[in-house]
Amino acid sequence: MAAVRPIVSARAKPAGPSAWSSWRRHVAGSPTQVVLTLLVVAVAGWALAHFLQWAVLDAVWQPDADRCQAARGTGACWGVVAEKWRLVLLGRYPVDGTWRIVTGSIALLAGVAASLWLAPRSPRWLLAWPSGLLVFAWLAGGGPGLEAVPTDLWGGLPLTLFLTASTMLLAFPVAILLALGRRSALPALRAACTVWIELVRGVPLVPVLFIASFVFPLLLSPGRSPDLLARVVVALALFAAAYMAEVVRGGLQSVPKGQLEAAASIGLGWWGAQRAVVLPQALRAAVPALTNNALSLLKETSLVTIVSLYELTGAVSLALGSDPEWRPFKVELFLVAGAIYFVLCFALARASARLELPQEMA
Amino acid sequence: MVLVLALVAALWLLASVTADHMRARGIRSGFDFLLDPAGFDIGEGWLAFEPSQPYWRAFLAGLVNTIRAAVPALVGCSLLGLLVGVGRLSSNPLVRGACRAWIEVVRNVPLLLQLLAWYLVLTEFLPGADEPGGWAGIAQWSKAGLALGGEGGPLLSPEYLALVIGLAVYTSAYVAEVVRAGVQAVPAGQWEAAAALGLPARVEWREVVLPQAMRLAIPPLANQYINLVKNSSLAVAIGYPDLVSIANTAINQSGRAVECIAVLAAVYLLLSLSTAFGMDRFNRRALRHGG
């Protein structure tokens, strides 16, 4: 005998402040806001006006060293980009092999992108990453069917991409082993992994690169040490693995204990449980932080310049170091290189934001 | 037990193989060279250094130079980071946008590139040494560097300035994000309570929000400070004589690569540990005072 309630039709949403008036309130609502707004507009306007004056209005666009010299200090010389773009982007790679290193880079990028986007659907796509690297190594370095190009001639953007992709790939399994070792029940193994991780994280990358270039050859018999690029990739991977191991450890900690017990109750051994139950969950949880690792690594590859490998940053110095005519216009090339890094890092950060979505739904 | 023995055996094998190969090539080893005269000059720094002085003193001068650059950079990145981090949460969309742009640009470009660019700007766009710019009596700047206190005051080289500015700017973006995360973690009730008391915004931030945010922010802040100290090693790329750059010269002069890098690693471990220790003390104090 419930009383029949009359249906009340919904009221319209109360009219809030319009977008414009709320914007105005935040931009100029109080004296403090007005001062802040004026300050930002003044500083940004001043900087932008000077930059535009330098970069556009007074700039020299032709590769004409004399006119650039005349505009020096007041206007940018974009002609230097037209003159030196090949050295900056590709380093000292032989000119007639340009197609090889460009195609190789595209294959490498395609492999990494396929792994990033499709691996959540099927783990088989993880193989696209090493495949892309192999294609790059074959096209850039030569081998069956192609003339050999020594790795010390690799340079510029392709070298940056290769260093980042190959280091991540090598560091990944090492990081997983280190993380598992640090959580192991065996005290000696646990201590060894902990000491290794903390030792590596306490030392800057520069001495690590020195070890790769000066010390590592001493470990091996004379004349038998692998070339510098291989040594640097191994050093970078061991360095990055220590940082990644901590991220993986965080992921492992996020997997509930019951999961391991459930795996044990269906008769899986320790390795089986880790492989089939714990690691997939842990790694999925660690993906955002792992992309952060990849981002730092992408930027840190610039340090290989210090041991004479000329990736994107080093190639700028290489392009202008021995050319007194164009040397004053390095700022322009640094801006171009900075813009390339920015686009790469920004795209990677967006991709990681995309990767976080599926697991939130899971 | 077996594992420990295996580890010790592996390390011993590695060391003896290295020593064998070094002997085979006629490379002398050992730390005795630290007492030999270094034979190179150090351009600048607080600890005066003569080429006739021993290697260990060169390393010490390098360490002093590293600290000389790291400490002002730590102060700079903290102040700048706090400013940008709070600005990132401002209700004013222009302020918010400007701070966001700062963070995105600064942390998406490699530090090495930024250092090289700062160095280039300081040496390319400043006036020549014969006609310096300046504020009367307080500071003078030119391609030769920044002189504080007018003529005869201490001269800060462009290498030093580029390193300090570059480190402070780069780390400020990370500090800003740490500050933002800390502020956002302060419960809404705390803001509301402050508003209910009628506290002005300035007092609200200084007395209620920031002290609580700092407690959350100190551990990740410690990480950023350690990173800054380690990143100061990039000084080698712009020619500021920090610890790494002096070790690099020492390797070339003495040929004792293993020993020099061991010294480097040990000193940086010590620096990282003492930064961590200092931040831990600070953390405990912050927790005690917050009660």
Image (cartoon, grey):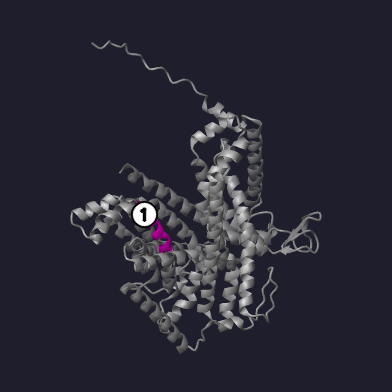
Q: Is residue B74 left or right of residue B23?
A: right
Where is residue B225 drawn, in percent x and y? 55, 57
Q: Residue at x 66, y 73 (%)?
A: B42
Where is residue B264 drawn, in percent x and y? 54, 72
Q: The residue tagged with tag 1: helix, strand or loop?
A: helix
Q: Chain of mark 1?
A: A
Q: Magenta span covers which residues?
A: A240-253
According to the image, label 1 marks what residue? Answer: A113
Crowding at label 1, few (<14), some or many (≥20) Cα neighbours within 10 Å?
Answer: some
Q: Nearer the viewer, residue A247 or A100?
A: A247
Where is residue A178 drawn, in percent x and y? 36, 64
Q: Main secondary structure of the magenta part?
A: helix
Image quadrant occupied by the N terminus of chain B? bottom left
In magenta stretch: residue B226: no
Q: Is residue A330 left or right of residue A126?
A: right
Q: Is residue B240 visible?
A: no
Q: Residue at x 46, y 68 (%)?
A: A95
Is A141 above or below relative to A52?
A: below
